[in-house]
Image (cartoon, coloured by chain):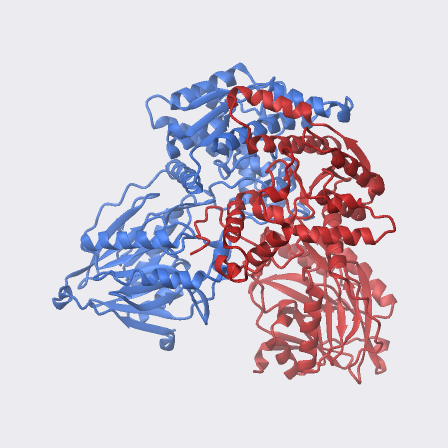
Chain colours: A red, B blue
Amino acid sequence: MSKDNNTSNITVNTNTSASMVSPDSVTFALAQSHFLVGDITANVEKMRALALQAREQGADVIIFPELALLGYPPQDLLLRPSLSGRIKSALSTLSDIDDIVMIVGYPHVDHHGTFNSAAILHNGHQKGFYHKQYLPNYGVFDERRYFDKGRNQVLFDYKGITIGLLICEDLWEKNLIAELKQQGADLIISLNASPFELKKQDARKTMLAKRSRDHKLPIIYVNAVGGQDDLVFDGGSMAIQADGSVAHEASRFMNQLMLASLNVNTFKFNAQVKAPLSLSRESEMYQALVVGLRDYVNHSGFTGVIIGLSGGIDSALTLCIAVDALGADKVYAVMMPYEYTSKISLEDAQAQARRLNVSYTVCPIFDAVEGIRHTLAPLFNKSPADTTEENIQARARGVILMALSNKFGHLVITTGNKSEMAVGYSTLYGDMAGGFDVLKDVYKSQVYDLANYRNRLEDTPVIPERVITRPPSAELRPDQTDQDSLPNYEVLDAILTLYVDEDLGYKAIVDKGFDADVVARIITMVDNSEYKRRQAPIGTKISKKAFGRERRYPLVNKWSIKG
Amino acid sequence: MSKDNNTSNITVNTNTSASMVSPDSVTFALAQSHFLVGDITANVEKMRALALQAREQGADVIIFPELALLGYPPQDLLLRPSLSGRIKSALSTLSDIDDIVMIVGYPHVDHHGTFNSAAILHNGHQKGFYHKQYLPNYGVFDERRYFDKGRNQVLFDYKGITIGLLICEDLWEKNLIAELKQQGADLIISLNASPFELKKQDARKTMLAKRSRDHKLPIIYVNAVGGQDDLVFDGGSMAIQADGSVAHEASRFMNQLMLASLNVNTFKFNAQVKAPLSLSRESEMYQALVVGLRDYVNHSGFTGVIIGLSGGIDSALTLCIAVDALGADKVYAVMMPYEYTSKISLEDAQAQARRLNVSYTVCPIFDAVEGIRHTLAPLFNKSPADTTEENIQARARGVILMALSNKFGHLVITTGNKSEMAVGYSTLYGDMAGGFDVLKDVYKSQVYDLANYRNRLEDTPVIPERVITRPPSAELRPDQTDQDSLPNYEVLDAILTLYVDEDLGYKAIVDKGFDADVVARIITMVDNSEYKRRQAPIGTKISKKAFGRERRYPLVNKWSIKG
């Protein structure tokens, strides 16, 4: 297995008084921090500040996440010809930081290709670099679009310990850590940009425990944090003992410079620091949605968000998330009633806004809808009403919100949940009009869970109980409820999870006991509404398979659901 | 170089009376035909019909394009668990076709992985298969998301000739044909699904000429044809002599079953058939746009298209393309004048519709706009007019067109050109509202070229001359012209081509002699309007780098243009 000719052994000579005496421990700083896509200048400055701070706190080595210098995922910025020069220049500005080893994730461009790499910087010298060997090209990942595959193991010696470097996917595969162990590694350092999905931190812990136990190696796992478009990096960086136990675990969803000291005789992390409590499913989902929205709004330069409240649960929950993400003073709620808006909806929308202390405006859309219908009347020639008229209401609201956005500079956020996005229960350019769909990857049944979760956090529920208990309705015609055209959400979501998240087909889903006609109808609705999703705003991924870059379906698609 | 252990040698015994006598030639049928994504049942039936027709015409071997059984590109349909069973079952239904060798592109799934493959079928037996070795994962291609890399050369003997198989990218790389030659190939057969872009057929010919001359091998190149979402496959299948000359060339953009006979003694294609004249740049562009729209509309099941005419050149050209794609009886033109619509525009829109004989309706949007403004008035509180009011006009038109689409079932097609899409000179949910943007990948200067080209095709120009000569304007405020906010289109398009299609950066573009401030402004506009393009309708790719799946940029993107 061992391929010595494929291994680089690097020695980092410390050349400082500290190295004269043999130390008992080496202290690592895990720089779990948000590095912005494209912003090389700001990222390198952040690295500098963190390195100085870590050194001040006694760290010997600081580790940044995967590709931190450019942010993750940089997408086609990796194809820009000026990339290589910018990266070299940025790395060189770090050369004046002495007395701390910096392990920096960056894209490496040379005549061999472009690599997803980690540089080892020390006292003005680049001691070596490691190129990622396993390049994920599934799900949200397109790494083989940009990167060439590294082919060498890299080990470096520092203060008597031999450290093997890996980047993200490298550690999920079992063979590289095995080779590093065989080549003498005492410790593994892994740089990551691992996006959040439900229960992902549990999966990471399980994998890390197995790898460390299998090879009796401690592991330092540094993850990115923060939102980038539809992805949220959830942190949770860890130091894992060689017995698989978690020695240190950083907070989730937050910047943190975490220190972990390794005893160079026992190769154990010195202090078994109590890890933060595991987050509940609802808590991690909610935090991901907050961070995803917060970072999108702030980094896009919007001064606030505007949201259409309907009185229903989706917009109620979205409002909570927006307030938790941005603060009440940056959230503008608009209720746009029309003929079919119930008194309850008006009351509840107002109650939601009041409880959260956000700006609230009622803007009836009668004039807009009437104007549009007037314009259309000669062309419609008294044809009977159908969903066209419902869509006109939704689109009138879309036009109003967009006009307010254009006039006052706030981002329109939308409230369509994953169940609706899946079956196309939404109006393009209507309720889908906006820049960010907060609940895009949240099934309706999870919307209820999250609403209840958020209400439990405070003595006075922020979402009026009636919003949660009343039957959901789009209120686009008299006495409409969602269940007029859809099965109940428990059944719908179960089928959608199997079809969308698990990729099961018609037969496999029917075999699980669901009504064949219902399954056929739901699957057909999903397939037929791909064109709507193609033009949908982005939203934070929280599931195993989110709509958007993770699920790439053709628009013209003649796949027979039952074939 | 030769790796014999990686090569399969297959002998196809013909077992027919025809094989008793040594033939002078073997006749190949190049099945350049449109195979629909996902529609395995229809595709296999089409293969059957073509095989029988080819046999009737004396062909010994019929060759279908890359992945023809499933259509190309199938995207995430390749991840569906029922794929493997469906494919096996489809291939087995071809087993009753005797006396012709079928070479079928299909996705091969087994315990080694999923491969992009070619099966050799003969008299009810699958004689062998070849797995594509070079998997493109750049531009519009995501093949490494789905496929494993083949590792074996495949040669098969038929009637005394040894045939080497390759699939698309395999032939653009130079080493595989070299290995096949060394292993005894007399002829190369290449299956392709090569999407159109400008001058692509020239590039193919240059490559094929080089490969055949370098190795003194004749090549049969079979390409797909037809539109799939944003891609158009342009056919142009070829039989290339060993000296690099084109022996046969199929039509571009059309189904064609083309026969080519190879002399088994000389290994020359018997008849040097005159190839169709090379298409002009405008002609191939125009045909690609026609086919892209036609196939999207027809395969999405729409009965027709509806288009908003402005009196300007973009909608005029789009109207021509729609009529050429679908026929005048399936095209519905609507002129939606408002306060700033000039008399010239009204006259010219009507003239365009009349000359092309399409349904034409004038639908003034005063009521719709006034209704919307009325609704907004209390919220706007007499703030001064700005682009908000322009967007309201555009969105009122979007709502009207979508309502007509919902009511009558026609697809709304949009008319935004690549220059506008690049700089964001368009209104989301306004003029961008629709299912297909015909000119999405056509720069404004190319719009003029195409308009003039189309006018030259008939004695009476279909686009009134004045539409081409007057200065372009969005007519959203008094006396507005596009050049109020943009440099002239020659300069704009030159900068955009360098930045978007060629990926050059600020410095490199300025170095070519463009004004630095203009370059900075244009590049910033491109970067800042990524969010609009993310929600834009699809449109046919004709350029080297089209917006959409080919250019993947982050929305939150802090890349400094000048860094």
- Asked if A552 appears above or below A356 in the picture, the reply is below
Residue B154 placement (x, y as % from top left):
34, 69
With B448 as the anchor, is B426 left or right in this view? right
- Asked if A471 appears above or below B355 in the picture, the reply is below
From where the camera sits, is residue B464 visible? no
The N terminus of chain B: image quadrant = bottom left
Residue B547 placement (x, y as % from top left):
54, 44
Residue B318 placement (x, y as % from top left):
46, 31
Query: Residue A343 lies in what quarter of the image?
Result: top right
For this orientation, the residue located farthest to the left is B21
With A43 as the anchor, is B20 left or right in this view? left
Residue B93 placement (x, y as % from top left):
31, 60
For this orientation, the residue located farthest to the bottom is A265
Considering depth in this image, is A563 or A397 the residue closer to the camera?
A563
- Asked if A153 appears above or below A407 in the picture, the reply is below
Considering depth in this image, is A314 or A333 the residue closer to the camera?
A314
Considering depth in this image, is A65 or B200 the residue closer to the camera?
A65
Q: Residue at x 77, y 63 (%)?
A: A279
For this orientation, the residue located farthest to the top is B343
Query: Residue A269 lies in what quarter of the image?
Result: bottom right
Q: Residue at x 57, y 79 (%)?
A: A5
Query: Residue B21 lies in what quarter of the image?
Result: bottom left
Q: Residue at x 50, y 55 (%)?
A: A516
From where the camera sits, is residue B49 visible? yes
The number of callouts visible is 0
- Asked if A234 appears above or below B355 in the picture, the reply is below
With B127 as the anchor, is B560 left or right in this view? right
